[in-house]
Amino acid sequence: MDKLIITAALTGNITLPTQTQYLPITPQQIVDEAVKCADAGAASIHIHARDSNTGAPTTDPSVYKEIAVLMKKRTDAIFVPTTGGTATMTPQERLKIIPFLKPEMATCNLGSINFSIHPVADRYKDGEWKFSWEKDFAASTRDFIFRNTFGDIETFYKTMTENGTKPEFEAYDVGHLHNISYFIRKGIIKTPVWIQFVTGILGGINSDLENIMFMKQTADKLIGPDNYKYSVIGIGYPAEFNVGALSIMMGGMVRVGIEDNIFISEGMLAKGNWELVEKIVRIAKELGREIATPDEARKILGLKGKDKVNF
């Protein structure tokens, strides 16, 4: 097996400040968390930016660049920005971050889905929300379709390739693996590819262990086991660690972080993303899997190197 690549997803855009006081918001907080996660064993850091004053998700390129520059100065971990954007952004707006920063790697979603956190809006009473935007934001996702058409996917892939950025393909359901298989057969997407099986989002496949194995079996059949590497995401607790342990045993990689799960154990909030990284490192070591350094991860994934980015 390859050494284990651990990705830390620090904030996301669906974890709400009301849910956990430990959500990093400012660029400095995000970079501090990135450094602690790298020190704990994360080779890759998945980045969403936040408005420093309100805690709301932001797609301001200057904020992403501030995070990228600060992070590059303090750690060798791989900077991986999202191209997910927000519900109000066009695909073209979501993609602007790539030619702007020319990162080593960035997310590339493999299909459109209903993507919702609207049940969270019912968990808190008026007066319990930390920021006024949170309840309406959560409730609005009830009618949100996360757009990623075949045309979008091809455009995102082409733009990333032109800028030397490796796509981190996000598969939220089995059908998304058929989508990437189509592009590979047509000669549009080149192998080897790097895929994350995203499980547990309301609107996508859930985090049952059988589903993880089915995603792996389907990818083996459609893409070929030698033509891709994969990581697994489980949303919530204990899914994050259950699917992580399974992926470790199957030879896959793992993503953890407050973007996906706010708990270190049942009912106990993680006091930082690094606690989640430390826990998955302990699990990996118990299962006999070595942890990849950032440079080892770059070699495994075939990245261009942090000296070739635009920050």
Image (spheres, helix red, strand yellow):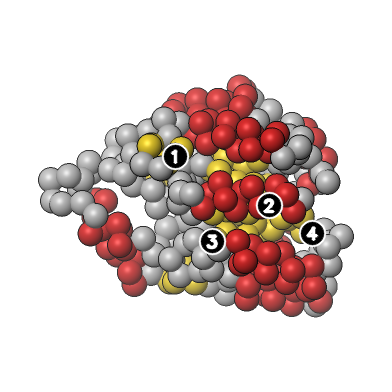
**Mark 3 or 4, which is nearer the eye?**
3
Q: How dense is the environment of label 1, judged by Cα within 10 Å: few (below 14), some, or many (20 and up)? A: few
Residue 152 appears at what percent x and percent y?
A: 60, 70
Q: Quadrant of the C terminus?
A: top right
**Mark 2 or 1, which is nearer the eye?**
1
Q: Residue at x 24, y 55 (%)?
A: 123
Q: As displayed, is residue 111 above or below residue 47?
A: below
Q: How dense is the environment of label 4, judged by Cα within 10 Å: few (below 14), some, or many (20 and up)? A: some
Query: Residue at the front extreme?
Result: 286
Q: Is residue 223 left or right of residue 52?
A: right
Lower position in the chain sequence, tag 2 or tag 1 = 2
Which residue does the numbered mark 1 point to in the structure image?
265
Amino acid identity at mark 3 = Ser
Which residue does the numbered mark 4 point to in the structure image?
228
Q: As displayed, is residue 114 above or below residue 98?
A: below
Q: Which mark is residue 207?
A: 3
**What's the CA distance linking mark 2 and mark 1?**
19 Å
